[in-house]
């Protein structure tokens, strides 16, 4: 996918901006002219469906396509929010991916993606002529889940040739996504390549694992595509699609027992909590808080991108929330060098409120708000771009 | 994708065979019960489409689904060929991917995949408790195409910890696929992990690049999804969708000028033609023959999997075909240690005929036929499994 994306993105940059042409989205399959994006962020979608009765595109909201005499359905949307959007096409009531884009694993299935460019200045997640790190897939067997698991590991540009040991950031995706999200939708590798080249961030290893972790017999359906699941058995106590029952306990156990030891055995890693960070987006942020706040002896840097413990389990109470980990602010501030709370400006006040409550309780924390973005990948790219430079200082 | 595949494949193996239950395909998204596969290789497909007029599944041939009272359309196919099949769903005339499977890049777009298991004995491409190599994405800039390119590089299990230098196999996908094909659809990494663990193959580096290579202004449309291309301009001399105009010249130039030097600079590689092999499937096999036969000073091992120069450019003539490279059999046999021609038994006689013509002309070659398989990935997995152990002997 990426090579096509990059080629088109680079092409886009070289072309210069400011024209009113509708440019193919950077995420289209090779040769596909649609969907295309206008400079004012409207997008035109096109579906060839001579025999269909109704065709819609769902990109945030639903847009009805109009059938032309040639059987080609089209619609031009209102201006879309900048950044990466999952979207789908609905053909006579059936929700499917648009065959003209590459697919991206979100909401538990491979749906379509469209990229609304931020503009020529926002090149922090684009490939530049700088040293590039690598993303490698790493297989490991988890004793806790009894299954083979895959994570992706970013190693910085000079990893292979050097002898240096590096600190490690464990970085999690969100609900319905997987270990591929951070380097395909998020461009985490390119963001770090660029930050490291500008000496804004220290070289580090980034471990992108899959937050799905279930022991044999455990039900993990909360992670899967809702409409495809068989109805749960009557009286089943299996967790439903909400996150109410989400404790993150199995992932935490797996991470501490299987993932971290494998990583520290396999890579040139700096040992100890001072060199270990964890962050995640949305549900991955919740998992990050659940894991790290219960194990402050193992983590020094904590990041929640559009996801934290804020607003869960009733109103925040410094004395009792998260088993009282915030009760002794001084002790907490000594242990946690960075507590980062990021959010898109269009996502509501919960995270800001949580940050202010923490501050009021004397807990040092960083509140980062991404202007004009929603609960989507551009918010999380910006969060990583702001969070990574704060690590290992 | 793979972690799900593996989990389910392993699960499938553990469950034991011989029951008559319809098991979810190993390539389904998490939780999806359909498509499922019966032990006799029939598959049941299911699409929820209350408002659709007609729903088909195209897996090799087209099967009409039947609508139930609940608006759920289903069909159980006749027994399918073993192995990996791309397939698509047609909803009221619109060809799309089935949202219930992971998608796989083939024919220029992300369509669905279903895996018909070979049976409990065929575990050569499944994960086992053996040392695992890594697949890493590698970015490089091509001066020839003027674009950033991505390849995937398999390094054997002991690569990171050791100091050994390794020979290199350059391995290409087929028409409409990309550099992801060999490790997602093909499981090249697991095949090599298993062969190396059994000491059947020598440890090697495998470079999986993208055979799409066009210079600025060159038209690469032969590689893209046909129905999505705009009609070519009247009188356009651009190559059309066939391979008639395919010369592979730009890829060969890019490979020699950009790819091989980058690989040999970046990895611990054994230099020289004795340690360089090239193979590919279908169009990638054609590219392999076009590249290697014109550069025998650079390659010692050649593999065509369901693709070679056989049957192209008129009848084979040892004296003149491929610029007479076969004219001096003795000289050719001295240079080329392995000339491998693989094919599925259901693909017709062209490759066997080509092999026999070469043999008649005194050219040593290996003809490998995969029993009961078509122009699909199981044929190519088996080709790699047979080809890799012949290298570097």
Image (cartoon, coloured by chain):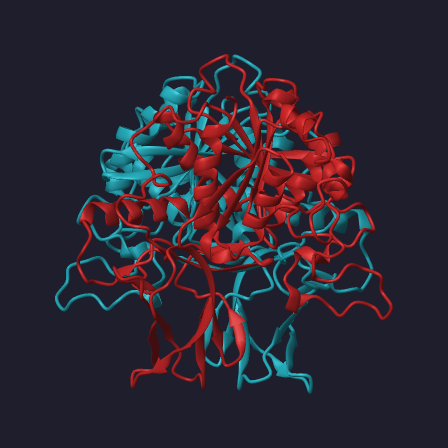
Chain colours: A cyan, B red
Q: As displayed, is residue B61 above or below residue A187?
A: below
Q: Which residue is drawn at 80% across and 54% down?
A: A17
Instruction: Give how far across and how far down residue B312 sits, in percent.
Output: 69, 52
Residue A354 at x, y = what percent? 40, 46
Quarter where residue A83 is shown: bottom right
Q: Nearer the viewer, residue A34 or A118?
A: A34
Q: Nearer the viewer, residue B369 or B386?
A: B369
Q: Is residue B131 above or below residue A6?
A: above
In-image side of B39 versus B350 (left or right): left
The residue closer to the viewer here, B325 or A103, is: B325
The residue furthest left is: A235
What residue occupies the far front of the structure in this picture?
A: B360
Q: Position of residue B361 (x, y in %)?
A: 65, 38
Q: Which residue is drawn at 19% across and 49% down?
A: B15
Q: Is residue A378 left or right of residue A286?
A: right
Tell me the quarter of the picture where residue B232 sits: bottom right
| Position of A193 relative to B288 (above/below) | above
Q: Is A47 on the left or on the right of B148, as rendered?
A: left
User: Which x, y percent locates residue B4?
Assistant: 35, 48
Q: Which of B220 and A207 is in front in this view?
A: B220
The reply to whether residue A128 is visible in this rendering is no
One can see residue A303 in this view:
yes
Instruction: Report how many numbered discs are placed on residues in the image.
Output: 0
């Amino acid at each position: 996918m990426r090579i096509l994306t990059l080629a088109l993105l680079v092409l886009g940059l070289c072309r210069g901006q400011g024209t009113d042409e509708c440019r193919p989205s950077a995420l289209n399959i090779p040769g596909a002219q649609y969907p295309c994006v206008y400079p004012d962020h409207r997008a035109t979608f096109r579906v060839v469906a001579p025999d269909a009765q109704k065709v819609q595109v769902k990109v945030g909201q639903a847009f009805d396509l109009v059938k032309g005499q040639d059987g080609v359905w089209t619609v031009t949307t209102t201006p879309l929010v900048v950044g990466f959007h999952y979207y789908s096409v609905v053909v006579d009531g059936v929700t499917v991916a648009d065959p003209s884009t590459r697919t991206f694993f979100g909401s538990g299935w491979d749906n379509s993606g469209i990229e609304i460019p931020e503009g020529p200045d926002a090149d922090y997640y684009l490939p530049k002529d700088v040293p590039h790190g690598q993303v490698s897939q790493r297989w490991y067997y988890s004793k806790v889940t009894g299954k083979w698991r895959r994570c992706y590991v970013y190693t910085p540009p000079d990893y292979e040739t050097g002898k240096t040991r590096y600190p490690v950031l464990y970085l999690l995706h969100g609900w319905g996504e997987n270990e591929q999200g951070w380097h395909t939708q998020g461009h985490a590798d390119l963001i770090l390549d660029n930050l490291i080249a500008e000496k804004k961030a220290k070289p580090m290893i980034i471990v992108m694992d899959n937050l799905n972790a279930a022991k044999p017999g455990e039900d993990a359906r909360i992670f899967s595509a809702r409409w495809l699941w068989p109805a749960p058995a009557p009286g089943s106590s299996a967790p439903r699609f909400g996150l109410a029952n989400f404790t993150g306990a199995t992932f935490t156990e797996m991470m501490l027992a299987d993932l971290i030891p494998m990583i520290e055995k396999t890579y040139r890693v700096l040992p100890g909590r001072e060199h270990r960070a964890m962050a995640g987006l949305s549900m991955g942020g919740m998992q990050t808080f659940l894991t790290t706040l219960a194990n402050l002896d193992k983590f020094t840097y904590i990041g929640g991108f559009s996801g934290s413990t804020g607003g869960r389990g009733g109103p925040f109470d410094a004395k009792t929330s998260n088993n009282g980990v915030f009760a002794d602010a001084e002790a907490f501030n000594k242990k946690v060098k960075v507590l980062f709370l990021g959010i898109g400006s269009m996502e509501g006040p919960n995270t800001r409120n949580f940050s202010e409550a923490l501050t009021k309780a004397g807990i040092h924390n960083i509140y980062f708000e991404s202007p004009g973005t929603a609960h989507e990948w551009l918010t999380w790219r910006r969060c990583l771009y702001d969070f990574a430079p704060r690590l290992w200082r």
